[in-house]
Image (cartoon, rainbow, N blue to C red):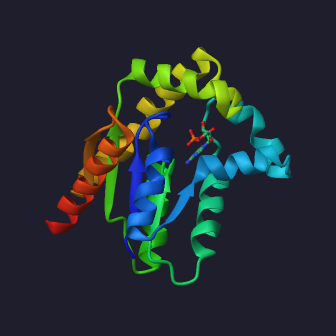
Amino acid sequence: MFNIILFGPPGSGKGTQAKTIEEKYDLHHISTGDLFRYELNNNTELGKKIKHIMEAGELVPDEITIGMLKNKILSFENPKGFLLDGFPRNINQAKELDRLLEELGEEVNVLISLDVPEEEIVKRILNRGKSSGRSDDNDENVIRGRYKVYKEQTLPVFEYYQNKSKARTVNGVGGIDEISNRILCAVEEHTKK
Ligand code: AMP
């Protein structure tokens, strides 16, 4: 398997870039944010439980998130690999992911971090909010709160994989194709190592 973590703050373009990368490497794209939004939009029991957490821009508790991610990963027969977007969001999730992949005789191959400054993030998400219908995209305080959660809880995940020599940073500002190329180059460079 070939497993990639697409990493970066909310609004850094992970969802947009995921399409190109999953096609290129024939991976299953798993976005925990999309999985949660599906529950929310269908008003499921889980959706009702996590609604206020997502609206506040906080992290859904690990026992829910990790269980959901594991089920999703195990639901594929003979996968070529996964492109994870929005997961892991903290060190505990990263360790649980590594444990699961190890049980499968696999590993995270590379983490690609999209680097985008906070002011650009706020601008992009407010703009996305005009059409996304996401309540967490419409309130600047919530957006800045999500960025803070990213810095405090999620950024350590970068270091965790950097210490395993698996993390790469890519400039996330520019045209969509330009950034796709940067990501693909970073993945290729990493695998050649
Ligand atoms: P995203 O679309 O990745 O920005 O996720 C939207 C929201 O879903 C986040 O603000 C969290 O409330 C929740 N969420 C998504 N992924 C995770 C995760 N790995 N751990 C905890 N909460 C998550």
Q: Which residue lies furthest to the left in this view?
A: 193
Residue 56 in view, yes or no: no
Q: Position of residue 66 (x, y in %)?
A: 59, 57
Along the line of sight, the residue nearer the viewer: 49 or 191:
191
Q: Quadrant of the N terminus?
A: bottom left
In the rendered image of this protein, does residue 20 appear above or below residue 141? below
Please indicate whether residue 133 sits to the left or right of residue 109 in the image: right
Which residue: 57% across, 69% down? 73
Residue 8 in view, yes or no: yes
Q: Position of residue 165 (x, y in %)?
A: 21, 56
- Residue 171 is drawn in which quadrant? top left
Which residue: 38% across, 61% down? 4
Along the line of sight, the residue nearer the viewer: 154 or 131:
131
Q: Position of residue 162 (x, y in %)?
A: 25, 50
In the rendered image of this protein, does residue 178 appear above or below residue 143? below
Q: Quadrant of the C terminus?
A: bottom left
Q: Quadrant of ligand 1?
A: top right
Q: Which residue lies furthest to the bottom in this view?
A: 78
Q: Where is residue 38 in the image (x, y as percent from the top left)?
A: 74, 50
Which residue: 44% across, 64% down? 23
